[in-house]
Image (tube, rainbow, N blue to C red):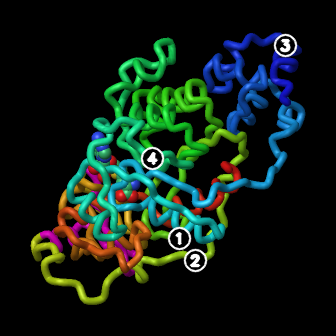
Amino acid sequence: MNKVKEIRKERGMSQEILAQHSEISRKYLSLIERQKASPSISIAIKICGALGVSIDKIFLDLSATEKPSYPNPIRFIDLFCGIGGFRYASQYAFDKLGLKGECVFSSDIDKYARASYEANFGEKPAGDITKIEASEIPDFDILFGGFPCQAFSICGLQKGFADNTRGTLFFDIARIIKEKQPQAFVLENVKNLASHDHGKTLKTILEVLRDELGYHVDYHLLNALDFGLPQKRERIIIVGSKKPFAMDWKFHIDNKKTLEDILEKDVEKKHYASPEIVAKRKSMHEASVYPSIWHENKTGNISSYPYSCALRAGASYNYLLVNGERRLTPREMLRLQGFPDNFKIVVSDTQTRKQAGNAIPVDMVARVIEKFLPLAF
Ligand SMILES: C[S@@+](CC[C@H](N)C(=O)[O-])C[C@H]1O[C@@H](n2cnc3c(N)ncnc32)[C@H](O)[C@@H]1O
């Protein structure tokens, strides 16, 4: 039970104004006021801020904890699976919690990603998700998906999510959730999702998940660097469950890998930049730490750090250079994303670079899933 309506009325505030100040839709606020939805902790904080009261005055049962009830096994689907970052991350989380997970469906449109996935997990993912009916997908308990970020044609839910998001890959996630009604989901996207189309893209996604599909949803911007990987990679993680939950996004990480742990000792000549490029880099920059990764930005400026800047699928060839001299090897790139060394590389260097650049930081997402599962089930 919450007292949002009571206190809003006491303040003489309209639903429109409170919704606006809390950065949610009026429809969602109305659901909260009618006790039909429990907001995430971050939204509860915004509502309380707008009403000028402390959280315990309004949301009395947010801290109530119920023992999780897990299906056995927990069936999951791996959408936009790439080379299986979510697959590793969820496996680590299941193992940590003593649970059994089972992947019942995976999909990726890229044939090289599918080849890598098959070589490593023994299952060939399905192809283009836009061509797959939700009814063809086996029942599952949790959906994982790192989907490409695309603008929506219309913002707001006047016409429903089908009209607002059709033609985007989020539409496919939404239609699958709508038909299959899983208990929970974990989605991943780039940092820019929050500012994309002036914030409308993220707003529409959250409205669809909350208002139309009826899930409790929270999201947060996380950085792989804070999860023990020497890569500055900021990603938005969206979690949702049918059960109300309060996610604590603070993590305590002990095992931090350094660049030295990641870098290979004997590196083939082919990975070295030409003497001209190395000389040019070194004339422009001097590193203060060793080893370091030299990063060239869009304007040609060079900076170096004891960690890597975000790996990118379509990055230019010398975007990142180890000690200003050589490119990262495919294995190093996979390590920077937290992929284990027994991950089999079965495609070309170019394809592996692209795949690693597209992947999720496994260590980061593993910790999120480990914390989220007991709240979601
Ligand atoms: C950001 S990557 C996700 C990578 C993955 N999380 C991993 O750890 O490797 C997005 C993936 O979506 C795939 N993709 C794009 N359009 C697709 C579609 N229509 N159907 C299925 N997969 C698609 C891309 O090939 C790419 O591998």
Which sits earlier in the primary sequence, circle 1 or circle 2? Answer: 1
Give the CA distance from mark 4 to mark 1: 35 Å
Q: In this picture, which residue range is highlighted in magenta?
A: 277-298
Which residue matches tag 1?
A: 228
Disc 1, disc 2: CB below 8 Å?
A: yes
Amino acid at dot 3: Lys
Tell me if residue 300 comes above or below residue 341 in the rendering.
Answer: above
CB at mark 4 closer than 8 A to ligand 1? no
Which residue matches tag 3?
A: 9
Disc 4, disc 3: CB below 8 Å?
A: no
Is residue 175 at all visible to an observer of this figure?
A: yes
Which sits earlier in the primary sequence, circle 2 or circle 3? Answer: 3
Q: Residue 280 location, x and y as percent?
A: 16, 68
**Mark 3 residue crowding within 10 angstroms, few (<14) / some (14–19) / many (20+):** few
Residue depicted at 27% across the width and 55% down the height: 313
Give the CA distance from mark 1 to mark 2: 6 Å
